[in-house]
């Protein structure tokens, strides 16, 4: 039973993170969670840069952070779907080669963890580029949107 639960969790993680890792974006549900944590994906800052008064220096710093992130996760983005497919193939066989499947799931989970950690580091670094006033303004805009107000 424990093995089955682990495999189910691994599959769910693989399926949900595969899309995220492939295009380096965050789906709407994940983005809402990030926003609730007080972090801001770069696309939100790009859309709000005039309103927030993002300076040229901030824009350059944030762009450099995003480029560094993208360069750091490119190999993961290419490798992770392949490793996820290997895991799925193992799980389709009957009987499932348990040791091999567990080793492959550990590999996939480690890659996903590295991707998530890099993304989290990016979001923290982006927030640290903003002034307190910009953070307060973003929080206000986000709070209104999450509650359905305009």
Image (spheres, helix red, strand yellow):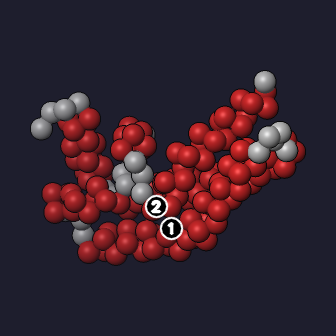
Density class for disc 1 (Cα within 10 Å; few <14, some 14-19, many ≥20) is some
Residue at the far top: name it: 1
Residue in view at x 71 percent, y 29 percent: 5
Tag in front: 2 or 1 = 2
Quarter of the figure that contains the N terminus? top right
Question: Which x, y percent locates residue 76?
Answer: 61, 65
**For numbered disc 1, what is the local secondary structure?**
helix
Name the foreground residue: 62 vs 21.
21
Asked if residue 92 lies left or right of residue 116, the reply is right
Name the foreground residue: 44 vs 140.
44
Callout 2 touching callout 1 (CB < 8 Å): yes
**Quick check: can you spot residue 35?**
no
* Circle 2 residue: 24
Q: Quote the CA–CA distance across marks 2 and 1.
A: 10 Å
Give the mark nearer the N terminus: 2 vs 1.
2
**For numbered disc 2, what is the local secondary structure?**
loop
* Circle 1 residue: 69
Question: Which x, y percent locates residue 64?
Answer: 42, 74
Question: In which image quadrant can residue 81 be found?
Answer: bottom right
Question: Which x, y percent locates residue 87?
Answer: 71, 51
């Amino acid at each position: 039973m424990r093995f089955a639960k682990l495999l189910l969790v691994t599959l769910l993680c693989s399926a949900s993170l595969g899309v995220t890792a492939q295009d380096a974006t965050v789906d709407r549900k994940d983005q809402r969670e990030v926003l609730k944590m007080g972090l801001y994906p770069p696309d939100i800052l790009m859309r709000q840069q005039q309103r927030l008064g993002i300076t040229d220096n901030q824009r350059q710093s944030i762009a450099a952070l995003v480029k560094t992130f993208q360069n750091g996760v490119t190999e993961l983005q290419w490798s992770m779907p392949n490793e996820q497919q290997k895991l799925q193939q193992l799980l389709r066989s009957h009987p499932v080669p348990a040791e091999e499947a567990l080793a492959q799931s550990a590999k996939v989970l480690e890659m996903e963890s590295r991707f998530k950690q890099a993304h989290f580091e990016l979001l923290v670094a982006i927030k640290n580029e903003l002034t307190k006033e910009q953070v307060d303004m973003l929080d206000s805009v986000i709070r209104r949107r999450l509650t359905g107000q305009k």
